[in-house]
Amino acid sequence: QNYQQPLKQLARLLNSENLQSVNAHLTRNVELDTFLARSEDTESSMAGSAVLQWPDEPADILGLKLLLIEKMADDNNFSFNFCHTFFYDRNIIESIRKFTSSLV
């Protein structure tokens, strides 16, 4: 079993028509690329040492999580690199598990 299919299914469910107005509200003040760049700036020479720079507002955090799930569902390379940078654990499946248990 791979991790891509459940991520794609989760992204599809989160993007249902019933959630569109909520999703728009959650993502209105956040920029995923800016968040990722600020977070990547914290990385040292050790794999997995970067720290995600979450905003203070709970709605903004949820919005960023939604955007992360969407991006991971769309881009397998991003999923791998993101988990390697922020949740490294010697193999990709363990890194993905660390991501899902701490973020999702």
Image (cartoon, rainbow, N blue to C red):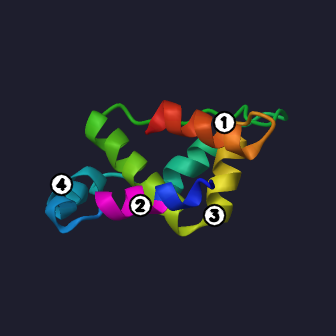
Amino acid beneath label 1: Phe
Instruction: Say if the magenta span includes residue 99.
Output: no
- Of residue 93 and residue 72, the one placed in the foreground of this image is 93
First in sequence, mark 2 or 1: give its number.
2
Q: Is residue 4 above or below residue 93?
A: below
- Specify start and end residues of the magenta stretch as a single range: 8-14
Residue at 36%, 40% (x, y): give it. Answer: 61
Amino acid beneath label 4: Val
- Residue mark closest to the camera, 3 vs 4: 3
Q: Residues within 10 Å of mark 3 (few under 14, many from 20)?
A: some
The residue under label 2 is: 9
Residue at 18%, 54% (x, y): give it. Answer: 22
Amino acid beneath label 3: Asn
User: Residue 46 in the image: x percent, y percent?
Assistant: 83, 32
Residue at 29%, 64% (x, y): give it. Answer: 15
User: Residue 72 in the image: x percent, y percent?
Assistant: 54, 59
Relative side of 15 to 17, left or right = right
Q: Quadrant of residue 58?
A: top left
The residue under label 1 is: 87
Determine the CA span between mark 4 and mark 2.
19 Å
